[in-house]
Image (cartoon, rainbow, N blue to C red):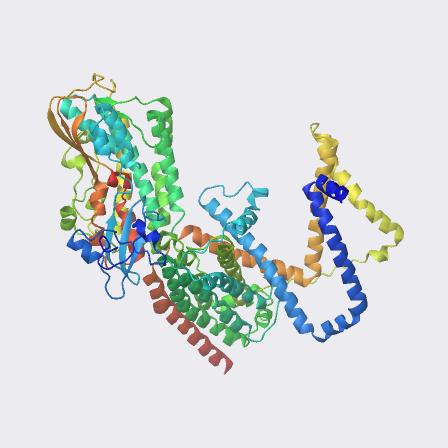
Amino acid sequence: MTTVARAWGRLTLPGKVVFTLLPLLAALTTGLVVTIVVFGSAVSDIVLANLGIVRFAAAAAIIIVITIPIAFLNIYLEMKIIARMNLRVGPDRVGPWGSLLSVVHGLKVLVKEDFTPTGADPVVFTWAPVVTYGAAIMTLLVLPFAPGLYGQDFNIGLLYFFAVGGLGVVGLLMGGWASFNKYSLLGGLRSAAQIISYEIPLTLSVVGLLILAGTMSLNQIVQQQSGWFSDWFVFRQPLGFLIFFIAATAEGNRTPFDLTEADQEIVAGFATEYSGMRFGFFFFAEYVNVFVLSALTVVLFLGGWNAPFPFPELAIPLDPGGLGIPLLFLIALVPVIATLVLAAPFYLIRSSVRWWVALIIGFVLFNVLAGGLVFAWAFVSFDWVAGLVWFMAKTFGFVFLFVWMRGTLPRVRIDQLMGFAWKWLLPAALLNLFVTAAAVVVVGS
Amino acid sequence: MTTTTSPNMHPSADDPRVLLDEEIGVFEPVPPYPPRTEREAEFYTLGDGQMFLNLGPQHPATHGVLRVVLKLDGERIVDLDPVLGYLHRGVEKLCENADFHQTIAYMDPLEYIASLFCEWPAVMAYEKLLDVQVPRRAEYLRVLTGELNRISSHALAIGFHALDLGGITPILYSFIERDEIVEMLASITGQRMLFNYFRVGGVNGDVNHDFMSRLGDWMSRAMEQIEANLGLLNENEIFVRRNRGVGVMDGRTAMQMCWTGPNLRASGVPLDFRRAHPYSVYPELDFDVPTRTEGDSLARYLIRVEEIKQSLRIIDQCLHQMPDGPVIANVPRLLRPRPGRAYAAVEGPRGEYAIYAVSDGTDQPFRFRIHDPSFLHLQSFGLLAPGGLIADWMTINASLDPVMGGIDK
């Protein structure tokens, strides 16, 4: 006993972690293997019989996980872009160009004290961020990222999106009410008034598009926009696009409509009393919302995953087996030779570069080149890779637009906000709907 | 419990006994003592559907440690009550117990955005008491550094105005101007914020190469740079709409409320102490007194923009007309003015800064009173804000541009 204890005591912390985790991992692996061997066929039968449910569960899991890097990326982009607009440097300490700062922010909110103020309703206070975050990530389920890359293809996809997206305000209202703070209450009520007002022009602005598309499935809407960029709905529904974008800005609580968390007026609005990860969920939800609204704008009006021009169909067949064994061995030599060739100039031209430093540089360069080549090959060979790239490029273009507006514009006042929604956006959306419907009737008859 | 609570029986966060109570109460921003005046009793009685909102002393938009209790009906302000004293340091009393020279250093933190304009009336008052003739080069240096400081103050006011309206970028552009000016002034005075530059009978130091090269470099592009930065606000529909018609003050009421400076001139009264009661070398300088008639927040913002341009003109003339000579008169180390009193006022970036000093023949002022314009602008909140929204209060506060150091003294 004492021998084991002494040996354990001599271990460093990583050693202790490894010696704790290894047996656990071994036991789990054994169990998994045994399970697969014994119940494998039964499990696969069940999975195959319920493919829809399994697909849904996998998509839901992936979407929940993917929101975190998306939020991190949006937060980093916002910090960096606004910093450049303010003629500042912005984050530049953690990671290359400060790119890991939002990860550190995430860790920070995790380890901070999660404080519940006196007088708050703890249950509602705790569930409010969950509701907001849940609404934000549930909307991702129907977004078509690329051909075949989507959570679910509902034939009421857009309706689902608006229905679930509108739930986010319930969380804000819950947080504002349960915080036992007047600033929070004002923020919650502001968000309720604002989002309910802007839901109407937001929904009405896409009705014209739905008349043209004839479907509510986001997948089919994207497919109808394939071809040249002139086929995108933005050119057939310019007014609808404008209304949709403005209302989406208000829906996402972004500047100039960020009245719910107007820090100069009501400190932090509904989030005033929140700290720790509960605040983190609100914060993440906001940035996931920015992504989701940008993505929906792209899907509805800018062709989704479609390239702006008909992309030539190039399928470069890679069949390494056809090369034969000797050539395959030669291919195995390519990384070594390429690394040496790329390292040589650095070693030869600058005498201060040691041979191993040059080798490292060459290796990194080779990896970058190889990665680039593989990406280029995948881009031209698989339509979902190309689609994902186009989709993300357009979406982050809109994310940039949201950030740009935040860096440029002051905030509107609550009465101006409401007046704008009811006096301008709503009539404009109705006009757009009327003109579209009339045009469809005239052209159709 | 019955002796000191207010009649509407709200427990207050200021009342230490609240902490002893077991049950959780609503902490209302109500004073823990019975109302001292009818106005206080009326204000701290809530009407139907109204609530108090305690704004400050820690709040992002109060420009310091101002605390305002707002009485709200929804988001509309019904009434408000500024609560002062969170930055009170007793500067006037400190000055009455300090040497005349030492008081100048106490003047700086009163007006920490534009410190020179608080030193200026103090030294002017002492010069009146002592009957000292200030060398002309020193007067030009005072005007030159003062106008630089005015530009830095106005630039900051404009930036904070935009920040209080939710625009996060203009403040950083304003800080570029301010930082260049502050670095310039640091090279001549030795300090970035609290300059302590003016002396009885002159100034502390002459211009040096560092100052002149920085100033020349900046002057060559100042106007262009400021115009470019203001494009973000002047042509911004949201900014203009947030300001136009908010916090309107007519000239007559403004004068009754003792307003001075850009805020008064925005209401159509062309009162500028540099012209109305000429001091220093301002009579020799050519500049305009811009006025506007609207009297709203936008007018107050635009007046500041105009004043920056006029200040640049003054600096240009100062540099061309500045004579050679000493920068400080022959003044004894220990000042013992004859018994008497003096009042000196200058036109600062926020209005009339004035000092009233009484000497009893010793080396310390017998009485020392500071007149600060921010205080007088602040007391007009009750006229401007009610009827507006919470966001309008931020606009009004930013456009009046108070500095809490001078308000609480």
The quadrant of the rendering that contains the N terminus of chain A is top right
Residue depicted at x 85% and y 55%: A323
| Nearer the observer, A189 or B38 | B38
| Nearer the observer, A398 or A286 | A286
Instruction: Return the residue found at the far left.
Output: B340
Percent x, y of residue A197: 39, 68
Percent x, y of residue A404: 46, 52
Query: Picture quarter containing residue A180?
Result: bottom left
Query: Picture quarter containing residue A62?
Result: bottom right
Residue depicted at x 24% and y 61%: B46
Q: Is residue A33 left or right of residue B279?
A: right
Instruction: Return the residue found at the far bottom.
Output: A445
Instruction: Return the residue found at the far front.
Output: A1
User: Considering only vertical position in the picture, is B90 above or below A331?
Assistant: above
Percent x, y of residue B253: 15, 50
User: Considering only vertical position in the picture, is B195 above or below A236?
Assistant: above
Residue depicted at x 46% and y 61%: A122
Q: Is residue A302 visible?
A: no
User: Considering only vertical position in the picture, is A30 above or below B122?
Assistant: below
| Nearer the observer, A412 or A279 | A279
Q: Is residue B15 visible?
A: yes
Percent x, y of residue A271: 43, 56
Count of marks, rendered view: 0
Q: Is residue A425 left or right of residue B86?
A: right
